[in-house]
Amino acid sequence: MPVNNQPSANSKRYILSLIRVCREFDRARVRQIAFRFFRVLGLLLLCAIITVSNRNFIRLANLINILRQASAQIIISIGMTVVLLTGGIDLSVGSVMTVGSAVSGFFLTQTGLPWPIALLAALGAGTALGLIGGILVAKVKLPPPIATYGMLWIGKGVSFGIMGSTPFFGFCNEFRYLGKGYLFGIPFPIWIMAVLVTITFLFLKYTTMGRSVYATGANQFAAKASGIRVDRVLISAYAISGFLAALGGVILCARLNAVDQDIGAPFLLPAIAGPVMGGTSMEGGQGGVGSSVIGALIMIVLTNGMNLLGISSLWQQFVIGLVVVLAVWLDVAIKKRS
Amino acid sequence: MVNRSKFRAFFLRVPTVAWVLLLMIIVFTISSPHFFTLHNISNILSQGSILIILSMGVIVVKITGGIELSVGGVMTLAGMSMAAALMKFDWPIPLCLIVALLVGTFFGFLNGIFVAKMGIPSFIATLGCQGMAFGIATGMNDGRVFSGFPRQMGYFGGGSILSIPVPVCLSAIAFLSSFILLGYTRFGVYVYAIGGNEESLVLSGKAAWWHKVKAYMYSGFMAGLAGIVVTSRNMTSQPMVGFGMEFEAFAAVVLGGSFIAGRGSAIGAIIGALFIIVLRNGLNVTGVPTYLQLAIIGPALIGSIVLSILVERGLRNRSYAGK
Amino acid sequence: MKKKIFLALLITLIVMAVYAGGGKEAEPTGEGEGTLTFALITKALNNPFWERMGNGARELCEERGWNFLYLAPTKAMNLEEQNRLMDDLIAKKVDGIVLAPVDSAGVVPAIERATQAGIPVAVSATGVYGGDIVTYTGTDNYEGMKLVVEHMVEVLGGKGRVIVLDGLLAATVGQDRRKGVDDVLAKYPAIEIVARQDAMMQRASGMQVMENLIQAVAEFDAVIAANDEEALGAIEALDAAGMLDRVMVSGFDGNRDALTAVRDGRMVVTLIQQPEKMAADAILAIIDHMNGKEVPKRLPTEMILASKRNIDQFKDKIDG
């Protein structure tokens, strides 16, 4: 505790200069940073509340567990983010996940081909489905919810076509490493997720195509007028979403060591709610990978926290629904202020 | 010349999916003697009543430009609430019915406030309400079902009025209600206006937001009604019974022509709902095993939707050019 | 011009798709006036157990020259779809229905409609609360689970900390198995149930629930699961956490994957059910009923405990 006055005079000067610096910043930028920070703050607050109630939450093992469980979900959310940024939506991700799992399962159990082929086939299938969805949106000009809803059903048909009514199980160990392995003590899926988050972030921020995504979402006509190949942007966005959804499916079935016909279905709605909660707007042009990851983490931490706190799984759905609505409302309300 | 424009006008009014539906009915009738029977038609309409009632509500919201994802959960909760009133509190049946309808309308009101007043995108708002509704439905009885209803409760699912099954009567009433609402009332005009051009409505002085809320309340009411029918048909109230129905209802209204905001109709929605029901029923009655059905349903759905959109665009472009 | 061609192609595609499905009924599998048609409705498409039921029923029908149709809800365990399937089968005027109910009370009105239409219904693998059924074939879930749990108790040496994974409590199958677990464990006060959660009889939820419980519960020695799929999911979670050598897991069903796990020492015990026989017995019971014979209301299907001791007997089930 300072005894003499010198430190407080210093602090006053310090604060004054800080205020001056802040004033010099562009108002909007400050607010932008504050909002992003605000959501992270919310996440941290949530973690703090849970830790107070159950110390097991903050243990490294639990945090790693959460991240590992969440990796497939986050990977899909990244794909969804790119699509959301263009102002669209991809309702087929759950179904494409299942296709990714089914294709890899098929190659692993029904053919003698080496596992990298299974992986490539799965990713190829997902990208193909995404491409079709993108073409439906960009060229045939179907509204995205309808185009991707149709792809959802096509995906289901493809999965059933591959699997018939028998689920696949029993995959080789090298493949399972994707889901179960560890690299430097951290589960492999987390590595995959981290790499993808970084790549997508850099892609969106620093490449022409990435910035075109934002432009297309903000105002498609203006984007076209300024020379952006909107068609290409849209198709790429959906292809990326398909690719990532298939990857998520691969990780999931590697962890589960089995595939069944509806493995991906529960992932769709959180893949939309997460990014939107994190600040990626459904109208396009706003948000990004960072926001989406935070939003997805909020949802995942919430679920894990509720489990740890012993909140009956029966009521968890209610809490999640409520939190999603409140979080998005907060986001909208704050945006209105600016 | 006159004939051509009348021809075109007729085609524009009838949703394309109606023709595909007709085609399907013909194909199924040829494939199985059990399809086009009085019994099966009655079966289709009874089974379909839940989807039809839900679609009649969802179409109103869809025209305003919203995506209604809560009807599955709200329907379930309405059913559970009604069952709770019946079994736990021993309320008389008419009162329990009112409970279901009130619960539905209330959640519709919530949705409306979220979307219209709080500015939350309809996708998220209705999704959140869905989660909340399912959550309450599961939590309110520890995940268990309510059963053992008194016999009279089965009337709304299994009884008949003048030998027409009650669910069919209810779906007919729902259809008429939406048809009249959308086509012949001022509220209907507002609904289309909100979908088409919300700003102009606001500028003309009407409280657009309140009409939006009413649209969602109407949808919630329908979900409540559907909850009554499904609970009555099953004579049980299951906390997950409505799971997935919101997507079916979405598909139904889209098939029926509601591709973008401001477009769609009650007739289109009911044809869309019938399309889905007839497709599933036809495949079952002609003996296609379920896992094979899924490979057919997808392409049939998306093919019909794409077809409808293209036809509609083609006709519209032609009519602009022709003049 | 291009659009017209596209339209024509689409229409053709749709017609072909629908007709391809519809044309199936013209299958000449002994098509004649006297051929009987049986249908099986299971709970979902994503568990090998239902697949085996389908196989058993199909083999029987092929043997006897009957028509067979296998249906299931596209959304797993969905009651509404099951009821729709029942109604469609009534319209199709099949000769008999075997049903594995998703909800023991919720299918009763549909069963009553079928009986009223003159179609005999037998339930299999799960019972019902009401309805005039021909019979209920299937394992005695209660007795079966008791066998499993007794075995686990023996392996644990009569004491330990146990996690229980329930499943599908809305149907008799979940409740009977839960009761079996509880009644046996009540006899051994040295065994403590440290956690209990519903894992919905699916592999994915089994894994997730187990992962969460691993974090929440300090130490435990065994996991008793309501069925094989849950158990296999839990095993994956335990394996990933490096706990599989210390923790014993039990299942129920006798799926091939589970038997492999028992052979490899990853699962301690499971109960082999005979879904093929359940379905076939149900159909045969319907035939007896149609011929006016007296059929017992409950036809238990034999079940066998499978553990490390006798796993060699089941080689054919694993490899076949």
Image (cartoon, coloured by chain):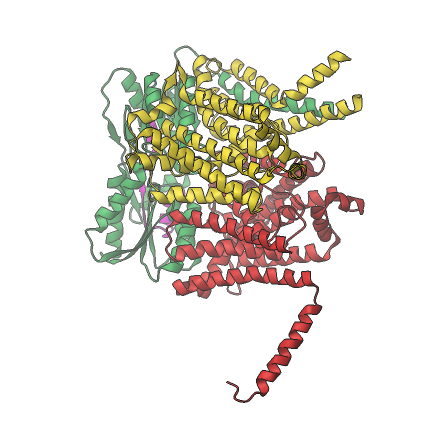
In the foreground, B90 or A241: B90
Q: Residue at x 65, y 26 (%)?
A: B308
| Chain C colour as displayed | green
Q: Look at the image and say whether residue B131 sits in the magenta stretch.
A: no
Left or right: residue C91 compared with residue C131: right
- What's the colour of chain A in the image? red
Which residue is the extreme one toward the front?
A: B205
The answer to whether any part of residue B229 appears in the image is yes
Q: Quick one: quadrant of the N terminus of chain B?
A: top right
Q: Is residue A287 above or below residue B16?
A: below
Does the magenta run of residues contain C259? Answer: yes
Q: Which residues are magenta?
A: C257-280
**Horizontal and vertical percent for residue A223?**
76, 46
- Left/right placement of residue A76 relative to residue C275 reads right
**Residue shown at 53%/65% (left/top)?**
A184
Quarter occupied by residue B185:
top right
The C terminus of chain B - image quarter: top right
**Occupied quadrant, residue B319:** top right
Task: Spot the yellow chain and give its letter.
Answer: B
x, y (%) of residue A250?
55, 48
